[in-house]
Amino acid sequence: MKVPEQVRRLALLIAILAGVTLLARFVLIPRALVSTDLHWAEAVQREVAKPVKFAGAVACQDCHEDVVVKKAKGFHKGVTCETCHGPAAKHTEEPGAVTPPAPRDRRFCPACHTYDPSRPTGFPQINPTAHNPLKPCISCHNAHDPVPPRVPRECAACHAQIERTKAVSSHALIACTTCHKAPERHKSAPRAALPSKPETREFCGTCHSAGTAAKDAPKEAPKVDLSTHGGRSLCWECHYPHLPEGRT
Amino acid sequence: MNPQMTQGLAELLEQVTGFIFPNEIEIHWSMLIVVYPYVTGLVAGAFILASLVKVFNIQEIQPTYRLSLLTALAFLLVAPLPLLLHLGHPLRFYEILLTPNPTSAMAMFGFVYAWYLMAVLLLEIWFEYRRDLIAMARSASFPLNVFYRALSLFSQDVSQEALAFDRKAIHVITIVGIPSAFLLHGYVGFIFGSVKANPWWGSVLMPIVFLMSAIVSGIAIVIFLYMVLTALRGEPIEMACLDKITSYLFYAVIVDFSLEALDFIHRLYQSEESVKILGKLITHKLFMSLIVIQILLGMLIPLGILVLAKARRFNDDLRKLLYFTAVILIQLGIFATRWNVVIGGQLFSKSFRGLMSYKMEVMGIEGLLVALGVLALPFAVLAVLLRLLPTKPHEEAAPELGGALPPPARTA
């Protein structure tokens, strides 16, 4: 088959372009220029030239072993010493001359522990205005092994979001312990000893069933016939117990 | 941080509402990134219009075929410019050539762009103009004749078989070109649609919506250019052509509008956790650009105008006026669409609890003046292209140089 004249010319042009590109890429341009190392060299130098301020997570244990051991068992085990005490490279060089600061006033701890709904539930959060006003945090809490000085009186200390939700619901007057049995150890080791949760339809039925089972329940509580209502579904598959939508 | 920037951010801080994260105050994708999808969309749209002539064989719009191709080329040449300027150090761009990254969605633009420019648009234009280039090389005087000869790659063959081959080649390239044009602008939509952290962007409909709006804007710009060019040249407008293209524009706007409405209803019904902040975004920050400019001025009113022009038997002059108004409003609307996607997507916090503000620069490298310059540049490029490559097939023969040329190529 005869190749048309214009295709031959075009093919020649494309071949030349491809050839020049390949020649430039693989022969003319030095290999070092294509490597990303060179592109980053300056940035690496710039970073390396910066003065070292932090001593690192392990430097402290050489001298402060007791504190490090204590902290390693507590809730703050993931928080490095320098998170609170600041960069301590100078202190490791001249321990006597330079002392890292220790935050002792109320302004420091709330940076992490002020109530914020976007924090994970169960994370200890307080309202700094209402929580023991003016008292420094360290007068009750040891930051190296932070456990509450006494067990929290109410669940809201940790479960603030649920508490705030429940407070505006029709379950506001029901205590958390009505539905959840929390072992005492839950207050000191929250994840190791979990509280119980209701497991059956009959549990909700103690207030909400239309029969005799709920004869002691307040009359405002909406009543349903458990044998027909909702089939075999569990109550909390449709209703959120901390903010139930039912109203009488 | 330089003091000017600090001051600028301090001014913005007062306009923040609700809760935002610290790194969200500065809007990083500025006006230039609005211009980029807008210009790229015009390329894809103009090319799709050109392909209607060659693939679907719609003869009425033949007068705009070459204009569409050149428009696509002019805008395509400018399309990477906003990105280069946005780099901050435009001269660093060669680094992406040295270290091509086939796994980065952002770097993929280089490949998509190169494919579309080299394998589709330039090839099609070359085959379309080859006969004319040879003819013009014969009739033009020095140095233009050398230029045309070089452009035609010193090709001489204008036999019937060669011209038939040109037509066949154009047909094949256009068939490859339609998915390529879809790829080009679908890619731009993909860049936004694939950001799953941003609910305003992250949607599988995004590439399709971008594509349809690109077709709308591309057809509209070609109509605009066609009307302006004929007026400048003092030629009559072919009303059959104009009526036909505006019909396509009408259908494209309907499809585009339906897709955007579908996207909107889908979000509203899904009602994910972001729906409240997006509602606030629309009613507070984007009310003017989304509700008023994009939907009302850019879609509903032009649709109304086009319906009116089609339904009533107006005379030619009034129809021209109506069409012209509609295409200008549509351009405005599509630009607002790009604005709402690019800027709108950066105006709410990832916490879904706060809204930011965008303060446009005027003089800076990412400012209004540069953006206007980038938007004006394709028209200058197009003016040069139109001067070198006329949209009318070259009629005059040069018998003394090589015998009469066969009649201009037309699609069979």
Image (tube, coloured by chain):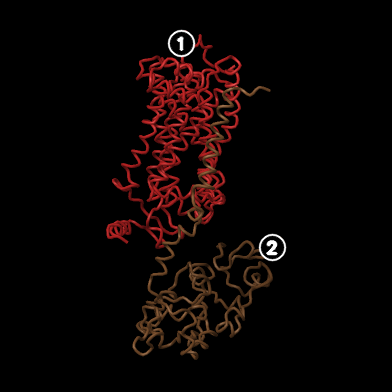
* Chain in brown in the render: A
The residue under the point 48% across, 23% down is B66
Q: Is residue B246 above or below residue B365?
A: above
Disc 1 to disc 2, C-alpha distance: 90 Å
Q: What element carries label 2?
A: loop
Using the rendered image of the protein, determine whether residue A27 is visible from the camera's viewpoint.
Answer: yes
Q: Is residue A219 above or below residue B106?
A: below
Residue situated in front as seen by the camera: B170 or B248: B170
The residue under the point 47% across, 29% down is B219
Instruction: Rate crowding at label 2 as few (under 14), some (14 to 19) or many (20 or more) other CA atoms within 10 Å.
Output: few
Instruction: Rate crowding at label 1 as few (under 14), some (14 to 19) or many (20 or more) other CA atoms within 10 Å.
Output: some
Q: Name the residue under label 1.
A: B398
What is the three-letter code of the residue carrying label 1?
Ala
Query: In what quadrant of the picture does the C terminus of chain B appear?
Result: top right
Quadrant of res B4: bottom left
Using the rendered image of the protein, determine whether residue B261 is visible from the camera's viewpoint.
Answer: no
* Chain in red in the render: B
Residue situated in front as seen by the camera: B251 or B235: B235
Quadrant of res A107: bottom left
Residue situated in front as seen by the camera: B12 or A46: A46
What is the three-letter code of the residue carrying label 2?
Ser
Residue A129 lies, in percent from the top left, at 37, 77
Of tags 1 and 2, which is closer to the observer?
A: 1
Q: Mark 2 points at which residue?
A: A233
